Image (spheres, rainbow, N blue to C red):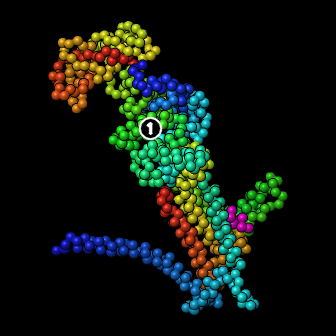
Amino acid sequence: MLSAREAAENARRQDVRNRWLLSAPSLLIIFFAAVGPLFVMLLYSVMAKGDYGDVKLWQFSADGWFGVFFQRDIFDDTLALNDAHVAIFARSVKLSLATTLITLLLGFPTAYFIATRSERSREIWLFLITIPFWTNLLIRTYAMQEVIRNEGVINTALLKLGLISAPVQMMYTDMGILFGMAYVYLPLMVLPLYASMERLDFRLVEAGYDLYATRLKVLWRIIIPMVKPGIIAGSILVFIPSLGAYVTPRVLGGGKNMMLGNLIELQFGQGRNWPLGAAISITLMAIVMVALLFYVRNASRPGARHG
Amino acid sequence: MGQLGVRERAILAAGQTAIEAKGVTKQFGAGQDAVKALDNVSVSIRENEFFTLLGPSGCGKTTLLRLIAGFDFPTDGEILLYGENIAPLPPYKRPVNTVFQSYALFPHMTVAQNIGFGLEMLGKPRAEIDRRVSQMLQLVRMEELANRRTSQISGGQQQRVALARALAPAPKVLLLDEPLSALDYKLRKDMQIELKRLQNETGITFIFVTHDQEEALTMSDRIAVMSKGKILQIGSPRDIYDRPSVRFVANFIGETNFLAGDVVSVEGASAQVRLASGGTIAAGLPEGLKPEGHVTVVVRPEHADLVKSGGTADLRGTLENIVYFGTDTHYYVKLDGGETFIIRQQNAHGGGAGHKPGDAVGVALEANSAQVVRD
């Protein structure tokens, strides 16, 4: 006969074993599909580059990591900052931050508008917001090209109105990329913002007005603090994919205005420098991790339970 | 008018009108779906008064409160605050504060920050805000919890914070929208006393909205009974209870016996009414009513006595049922005219009147206890 304590202990062990068994399939998938490839990438980043792409297996070299920000002068072998790479990193961060800001400024009133509609029309508005999601990214980006190119919708309209005398060059500029990314990532900002605004207790807004807060003060002191988790979530959701964006800068920025995604692609493609590509990828991931840590720290603060 | 308390007299003597609604109509929707939440309502509320808007849900009491607060704007009419029409002003420009039914405390602020919010928005200097906040915390006995988040305090404490927050900017009028409805019975009783104390100490005009007639009777200086967007009667609790002027008011507040009768004669504020189930009695008349023919008379159950069949009585019938309630006993009398009349008698120690169901009995009404009501 087992004592009650032993029986309980056995049951607990059985329980733990079952949990591991049940989660084994997903753990395997996560390992082989995510952690495994990451590990391979980490490994490739510290190996010597092959002559025609690929790497020389087990020939370790720091060249990949070195090349992320530095370069050796072709003639005298002196160390120098790789200006091109630094510029691309800077442009990526700058454009991603700008995209986040633009989508926030556009998305906030949009989400507020939807959240204050009647229950039925909210669904319609949300559906309209998510429609672009059903369309291929490439097609959406080409549509954007149609809007901003020199003979595009904006320039034609401005010319017809006589506001400009020559087309404004937007294609193949940072502004063009910004336009495209803001358009593509706007729903990712609107949805989390809407989610936290929908839960916003509008009686608190009334209480604010009652206590002599003007519209601006109510927005600043009550609405924004209450929907802060949504603002942070939306910003993260826009900032992270913007940072690694590939298609939009490729199509709208042409070949010169590269972002990190294009730089990585270049190293694995024509550049035939896989270790460098791998190192840049991991650097990008590190930036994202820092952004995420920032989010987790902010979202887990007491009083921000609405996320 | 019924008897006036000392406090009421003081208010009447002071007499200044704090808030006045003039012909206020509020319509929601348009065309065929239009609903009149308030229909040409006029009321004048005096300075330093504890004024209650009482009525069932949907009667328009909360709508009237929201119009005074400025969350909604009247379709027609004026709302005067010390003579100035505030109806078109946004809520943040009205020296009026609200205690919300849900309290609506800001969850991202501490208790002290909540209480100081109004003063901060008014642009008061920090030192003054701090002083006022600690004064308010003391007033509602919450000093120890100043730095708690509002989610970390109990419902009763949240109620106090909501009160302190609304009182802190020293509004000219405090609006209370069923503030006690979320509290349990015991706490509600305590808060009723607390509210009266706060009103006495601050001297601010309170407009209190409730559907609870007992709450209204115990706390108010005057009550306005509302139904279907109209004010039916305004008066002191005693007025409203003893001299209801409308059938709805008599029915909504307390228990009442309704008796059918015919007017024999009218003299001043009183009428002789021949009841269907007995003799002719004198019944009070609501102001401005000169009834003829068929009328309804109301008598409160505690304003009548049960008498033996031989005694002098205003009504006659058969005792149907006796229900013992501890403090008092209810007698159900089936009147000869077919109506049921309820008598409530306080129980004397070791008493027992010696009546039993089935007895033929008489009902004697106290002098001046009967009142004719409008239908």
Work out which residue is located at the far right of the displayed protein and give it.
Answer: A165
Q: Main secondary structure of the magenta part?
A: helix
Q: What count of labels does the image hold?
A: 1
Q: Is residue B307 above or below residue B51?
A: above
Q: Is residue A41 visible?
A: yes
| In magenta stretch: residue B251 | no
Residue position marked by numbered label 1 in the rendering: B198
Is B226 or A261 nearer to us in this picture? B226
In what quadrant of the picture does the N terminus of chain A appear? bottom left
The percent coordinates of residue B188 (x first, y second) are 37, 40
Mark 1 belongs to which subunit?
Answer: B
Q: Quadrant of residue B76?
A: top right
Q: Is residue B135 above or below residue A284?
A: above
The percent coordinates of residue B148 (x first, y second) are 45, 54
Q: Quadrant of residue A23?
A: bottom left
| In magenta stretch: residue A178 | yes
The residue stretch that appears in magenta: A173-179
| Amino acid at the residue labelled 1 | Leu
Work out which residue is located at the far bottom of the displayed protein and give it.
Answer: A59
Q: Residue at x 69, y 62 (%)?
A: A179
Is A307 or B238 nearer to us in this picture? B238
Q: Secondary structure at mark 1?
A: helix
Q: Quadrant of residue B363?
A: top left
Q: Is residue B84 above or below residue B194?
A: above
Q: Residue at x 73, y 67 (%)?
A: A173
The percent coordinates of residue A63 (x first, y second) are 63, 87
In this rendering, would B215 be left or right of A104? left
Is B90 or A42 nearer to us in this picture? B90
Q: Is residue B81 above or below residue A213?
A: above
Q: Residue at x 69, y 84 (%)?
A: A71
Q: Residue at x 46, y 77 (%)?
A: A31
Q: Is residue A191 visible?
A: no
